[in-house]
């Protein structure tokens, strides 16, 4: 029997999970109201006090928190414990603006490690495994998170960090790594490099835990095939602790959220209204066990669906889908939410390159959606009747995906304008009227 698995928590009844969440939410709200002036101001502005919060049902009374709030409060503005009680900071890369810094007490680190340990266990990890961590270490949460989880499981941990592919492969062969933790793009690259060197037979990997990047089902198949492993997804954000907020089980059908530590909600990104399970919207997290840096109703900007359908692995914690896009990218056309990622999925499924442009305009007071799609050079040499049949096929497939009509225009390869090497995806002409 593995030495780290918490079926009494991970397979608890829905009622039990709700009871934990109710109690811990009430406690967390009191904690931030008393100790974080920034939160107290936000709550006062909304006219809500800790006395109004009795259970998860009251969550919707609380204000949202966004990345802008975290940047405004940088560095200490959201700290909920004395700095002397903290033992660690982690930080985002800051590529999209000011850095976000998150603080941890030892208790917070322990809980984070627990969450990552669950992810490793769900991928089949035991104390007999050799866990090869080539996420970056340092301020980035990937390396430290999986490292801590692996220690809890009792696996032999290789703190490789990122880069130096030659050395990664050598250690993998020499030390018999069985579980690989890194970004999916690096896993694919490692797979290729191992094949190029003809070292497939020397690799003992059985599973991989990949996150910190968006990746598709096609990429999963590719990695699984190249490395001969089962590839598991893991999700987390530095702001809400790091990797391990949710993780995939062997079913590979969505990631179980560690609901004893985090409450997940799906909201309409435009109105903030909470949506029922099964509906697509923006993922919002509330941490209910963190001491130093608890976040209440933090808007992740990731578009997801939650599912409470029974999972055959036995875990009862709610599952979230892979993020399907960012709420910042969402378009509203004829009152319907449209994500570029949905259009991209249709195009890739039908064998088109992912070079397309979405043009939204307004004609006679009604929205018009047009999708320009680059053909492959082979398609381009087809006769016109075939091109027009292809356009009709795409119109049908897009209607099925989006629920609305989109005009499709197939265009010559490389004819869509690019900026910094990337196609300009969305042109919303409605803003010009
Ligand atoms: Zn499961």
Image: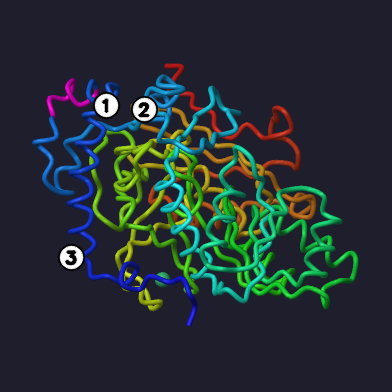
* Rendering coords of residue 74 (x, y %): 45, 22
State ligand 1's quadrant.
bottom left
* Residue located beneath label 3 in the image: 15
The quadrant holding residue 345 is bottom right
* Rendering coords of residue 189 (x, y %): 77, 56
Q: Are marks 2 and 1 in contact (CB under 8 Å)?
A: yes
Residue 174 position (above or below residue 405): below
Residue at mark 2 to residue at mark 1: CA–CA distance = 8 Å
Q: Nearer the viewer, residue 42 or 223?
A: 42
Q: Which structural element holds mark 3?
A: helix
Residue at mark 3 to residue at mark 1: CA–CA distance = 29 Å
Q: Does ligand 1 reach within 8 Å of label 3's beta carbon? A: no
Q: Is residue 44 visible?
A: yes
- Give the mark nearer the N terminus: 2 vs 1: 1
Whether residue 421 is in magenta: the answer is no
- Give the mark nearer the N terminus: 3 vs 1: 3
Q: Which structural element holds mark 1?
A: helix
**10 Å neighbourhood of mark 2: few (<14), some, or many (≥20)?**
many
* Residue located beneath label 1 in the image: 39
* Residue located beneath label 2 in the image: 78
Number of marks in picture: 3
Residue placed furthest toward the top: 433
Q: Which mark is residue 254?
A: none
Predominant SS of the magenta segment: helix
Image point (31%, 57%), residue name: 260
Q: Which residues are magenta?
A: 42-48
Residue 309 position (above or below residue 295): below
């Amino acid at each position: 029997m593995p030495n780290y698995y918490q079926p009494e928590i991970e397979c608890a009844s829905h009622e039990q999970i709700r009871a934990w969440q109710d109690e811990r939410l009430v406690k967390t709200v009191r904690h931030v109201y008393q100790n974080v002036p920034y939160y107290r101001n936000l709550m006062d502005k909304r006219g809500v006090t800790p006395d109004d919060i009795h259970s998860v049902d009251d969550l919707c009374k609380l204000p949202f928190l966004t990345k802008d709030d975290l940047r405004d409060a940088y560095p200490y503005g959201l700290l909920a414990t004395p700095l002397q009680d903290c033992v660690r900071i982690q930080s985002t890369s800051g590529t999209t603006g000011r850095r976000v810094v998150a603080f941890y007490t030892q208790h917070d680190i322990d809980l984070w490690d627990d969450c990552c340990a669950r992810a490793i266990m769900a991928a089949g990890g035991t104390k007999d495994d050799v866990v090869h961590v080539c996420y970056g270490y340092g301020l980035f949460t990937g390396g430290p998170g999986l490292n801590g989880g692996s220690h809890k499981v009792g696996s032999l941990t290789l703190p490789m960090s990122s880069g130096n592919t030659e050395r990664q492969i050598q250690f993998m062969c020499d030390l018999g790594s069985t579980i690989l933790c890194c970004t999916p793009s690096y896993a694919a690259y490692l797979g290729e490099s191992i094949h190029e060197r003809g070292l497939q037979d020397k690799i003992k990997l059985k599973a991989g835990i990949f996150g910190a990047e968006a990746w598709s089902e096609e990429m999963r198949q590719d990695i699984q095939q190249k490395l001969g492993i089962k590839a598991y997804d893991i999700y987390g954000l530095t702001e809400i602790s790091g990797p391990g907020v949710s993780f995939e089980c062997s079913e590979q059908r969505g990631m179980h959220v560690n609901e004893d530590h985090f409450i997940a909600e799906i909201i309409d990104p435009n109105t903030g209204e909470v949506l029922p399970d099964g509906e697509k919207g923006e993922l919002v997290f509330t941490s209910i066990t963190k001491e130093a840096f608890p976040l209440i109703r933090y808007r992740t900007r990731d578009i997801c669906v939650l599912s409470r359908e029974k999972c055959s692995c036995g875990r009862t914690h709610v599952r979230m889908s892979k993020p399907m896009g960012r709420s910042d990218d969402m378009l509203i056309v004829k009152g319907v939410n449209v994500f570029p990622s949905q259009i991209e999925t249709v195009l890739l499924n039908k064998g088109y390159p992912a070079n397309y442009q979405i043009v939204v305009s307004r004609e006679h007071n009604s929205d018009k959606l047009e999708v320009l799609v680059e053909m492959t050079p082979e398609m381009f040499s087809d006769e016109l009747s075939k091109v027009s049949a292809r356009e009709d096929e795409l119109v049908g497939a897009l209607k099925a995906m989006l629920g609305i009509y989109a005009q499709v225009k197939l265009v010559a390869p490389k004819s869509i304008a690019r900026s910094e090497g990337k196609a300009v995806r969305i042109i919303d002409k409605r803003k010009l009227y």
